[in-house]
């Protein structure tokens, strides 16, 4: 769109919303959301039919260094739980009508080779980033490419990204520190529920890991050094979905680390992102600030799996339905402002 067409489009969009039977601005953030989707799809009559929730699962070498309240085998066990339909993500996706796709991005003990799990492993989990890079740059590139393909596949209007990976709040914390410049200790939290001693140990381990590198790292370097296969694949999926002009429903702390990476790699992808909930994990605030994002929901959740994204999906549908289906003052014979 050239500048004049863009200005005309914005004016027509705002006029359409302001002529609906409500006091001006009375639907608050639902109005902003409608504007965002209309801009993304470049139409005054956007469509928000189907959404996919893709859960990317991966194991982390750093988990063996004592940074999580749960053992690493939970990643694999939860992938089987997703395939069996028993996790929170399954329940919320079913209630709100999202299709679920479980992606093995690199789980120890894989491939699963079974119905309901899409095997696309980059490796059997990352290496511990305490001692060297989590992955090679080839692995990072492959994960991004696979993610891009997944993000653009199918006939979806929205892509919700979730993740599962014991140890991945460690990865996300280091990435947050490196990408935002906020002090490491401030962005490291309890993850799955570390006690005070566990949190102190996690801070110490991650401090030593960060000391391995010097100087500012480019986003792709940071991802290669300290990322996870599921984080890299999720980053790719967000880029692929944004490029296909799909809404990207961003979940909690780890998913938002992927979103910041995506926005740093391709700034144009930011416009597709809807930030769904504010996680209880402390580092999330730093990521949201860097993205100038204010999530739709704040439910004190810190689960991951895309659960916050699945819960926010009906709000996006409602915003688009408002734009398409709500009557104008003229249609409904309602008087405008006095
Ligand atoms: O999404 C979040 O905000 C979030 C916050 C804390 C933990 N998690 C989930 O918990 C796991 C990582 O926690 P941890 O303690 O093993 O690093 C991983 O499977 C995430 O999905 C997720
Ligand atoms: C049980 C369990 C479920 C999860 N879902 C996402 N992260 C998780 C971590 C644990 C420990």
Image (tube, helix red, strand yellow):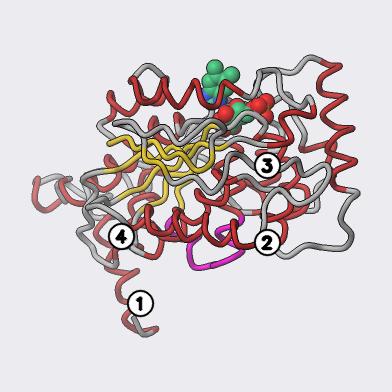
Above/below status of 74 relative to 23 = above
Gap between marks 4 and 2, in whole Å? 30 Å
Above/below status of 37 relative to 91 = below
Indicate which disc residue 134 carries.
none
Q: Report whether the residue tagged 3 is closer than 8 Å to ligand 1.
A: yes
Q: Is residue 132 visible?
A: yes
Pointer 3 or 2: first along the chain: 3
Gap between marks 2 and 1, in whole Å? 31 Å
Q: Is mark 3 on a helix, strand or loop?
A: helix
Q: Do the residues labelled 3 and 2 touch (CB within 8 Å)?
A: no
Q: Name the residue under label 3.
A: 172
Q: Badge 1: how crowded within 10 Å, few (<14), some, or many (20+)?
A: few
Q: Mark 1 points at which residue?
A: 6
Q: Mark 4 points at which residue?
A: 38
Q: Report whether the residue tagged 2 is closer than 8 Å to ligand 1.
A: no
Task: Please tell me which residue is depicted at 53% across the width and 49% down the height of the picture.
Answer: 122
Q: Is residue 220 left or right of residue 13?
A: right
Residue 1 coordinates in the image, percent (x, y): 34, 80
């Amino acid at each position: 769109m050239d500048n004049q067409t863009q200005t005309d489009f914005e004016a027509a969009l705002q006029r359409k919303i302001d002529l609906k039977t409500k006091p001006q601005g009375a639907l608050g953030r639902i109005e902003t959301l409608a504007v965002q989707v209309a801009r993304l799809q470049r139409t005054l009559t956007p469509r928000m039919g189907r959404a996919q929730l893709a859960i990317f699962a991966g194991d982390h070498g750093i988990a063996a260094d004592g940074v999580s309240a749960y053992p690493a085998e939970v990643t694999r066990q939860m992938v089987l739980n997703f395939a069996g339909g028993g996790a929170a993500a399954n329940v919320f996706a079913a209630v709100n009508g999202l299709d679920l796709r479980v992606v093995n991005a690199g789980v120890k003990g894989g491939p699963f080779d079974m119905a309901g799990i899409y095997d696309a492993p980059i490796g059997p989990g990352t290496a511990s980033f305490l001692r060297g890079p989590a992955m090679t740059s080839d692995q990072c590139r492959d994960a991004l490419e696979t993610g891009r393909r997944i993000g653009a596949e199918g006939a979806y209007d929205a892509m919700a990204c979730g993740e599962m990976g014991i140890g991945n709040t460690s990865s996300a914390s280091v990435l947050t520190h490196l990408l935002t410049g906020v002090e490491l200790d401030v962005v490291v939290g309890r993850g799955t529920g570390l006690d005070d001693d566990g949190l102190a140990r996690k801070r110490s381990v991650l401090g030593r890991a960060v000391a391995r590198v010097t100087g500012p790292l480019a986003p792709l370097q940071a991802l290669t050094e300290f990322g996870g296969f599921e984080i890299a694949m999720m980053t790719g999926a967000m880029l692929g979905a944004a490029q296909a002009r799909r809404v990207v429903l961003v979940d909690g702390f780890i998913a938002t680390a992927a979103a910041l990476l995506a926005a740093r790699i391709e700034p144009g992808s930011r416009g597709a992102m809807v930030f769904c909930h504010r996680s209880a994990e402390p580092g999330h605030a730093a990521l949201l600030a860097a993205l100038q994002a204010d999530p739709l929901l704040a439910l004190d959740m810190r689960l991951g799996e895309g659960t916050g994204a699945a819960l926010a999906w009906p709000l996006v549908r409602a915003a688009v339905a408002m734009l398409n289906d709500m009557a104008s003052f003229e249609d409904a014979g309602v008087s405008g402002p006095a």
